[in-house]
Image (tube, rainbow, N blue to C red):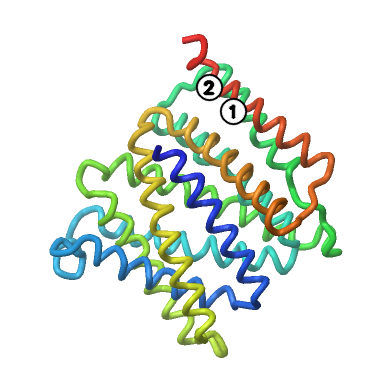
Amino acid sequence: MWLLFSILSSAALMVIFKFFARFEIRVFPSIVVNYVTCFVLGNLLLGDKNIVAASVWTQHWFPYLVGMGLLFISAFYLMGLGTGLAGAGATSVAAKMSVVIPAAVSMLLLYEKPGVFILIGMLLSIFSVYLMRPENNDGKGNRGLWVLLLVFLGSGMVDTGLNLVKHHFGADVDDYTMSTVVFGGAGFIGLLLMIFQKGQLPGWKEVLGGVVLGCTNYASLIAMFGAIGNYKGETAWFFAVNNIGVVWVSTLISMLFFKEKISKMGYAGLLLAALAVLLMNIHAFFG
């Protein structure tokens, strides 16, 4: 259930960003409102144990979680920069193919040992994401390749960081406190940047969009932490399957509700993704 919740909530984030583009809602101020919403929502859910009242500031895990907030907002900024320089399709592919980074770190640092079929499935999943990239009609060509590399690294570092903080601090702090601190760090940095940048103050559309995005984003992180904890020792598998699931759901929603067309290569990518999931779960069928 955590895996399914993670896939659906992450796909919902992509759908919300599509509405941002349709209704001309500015992304950066909406993202800042989103993080503030996450911080407020998290403290409301924590009640008497909220991080404002609780003595979390001196805990050994606090600076690491705040650092994750810096990674979060940096990755969002890079994705926005990449969309402008290299196009939305190429940026989306770079972000999703970064799944190889947390998977590799899980095997190298957390000593996970996925089987042969899981490794093959992970490789196929990366290739399937590339095949499912949107057709590039924005004329960007190969511009912004350096930004795409940073998007790849930034997105991979976010997932890797979430995996590592959950692994090392999951026994010391609950998922709600962990998520609230991460989003609080991102929100604080975002507010500072917004204050010093002209024309970035949110209007009513950005406030409304940011609140909706924030509620969904908080649910997404809680789901990811829950899934990482549930699949302890198999997080490389989780990130690969989660990534494919998000691509599948968001692609189908784009086709059905946003009337986006998918190329023949895209259909091949969907089939290859299904094969990858089957291979990565072959142990469940044949034990």
Determine which of the numbered discs, if any, sits on residue 277 in the image: 1
Q: Nearer the viewer, residue 32 or 73?
A: 32
274 shown above or below 59 = above
Find residue 80 and report its image quarter.
Answer: bottom right
Find residue 131 and report its image quarter.
Answer: top right
Under tag 1, what secondary structure?
helix
Find residue 267 and report its image quarter.
Answer: top right
Question: Residue 83: percent from the left, percent from the top?
Answer: 69, 64
- Residue found 32% across the figure and 39% down from its top: 167
Q: Which residue is mark 2?
A: 281
For label 2, the crowd category at 10 Å Cα-Cα, with few meaning under 14, some 14 to 19 and many 20 or more, is: some
Question: Residue 113: percent from the left, percent from the top?
Answer: 46, 21
Residue type pointed to by label 2: Asn
86 lies left or right of 212: right
Question: Residue 74: percent from the left, percent from the top?
Answer: 51, 64
Q: Nearer the viewer, residue 116 or 268?
A: 268
Q: Disc 2 versus disc 1: distance between alpha carbons?
A: 6 Å
- Residue found 50% across the figure and 40% down from its top: 102
Q: Nearer the viewer, residue 207 or 195?
A: 207
- Residue found 13% across the figure and 64% down from its top: 48
Question: Residue 260: percent from the left, percent from the top?
Answer: 76, 55
- Residue found 60% across the figure and 30% down from its top: 122
Residue type pointed to by label 1: Val
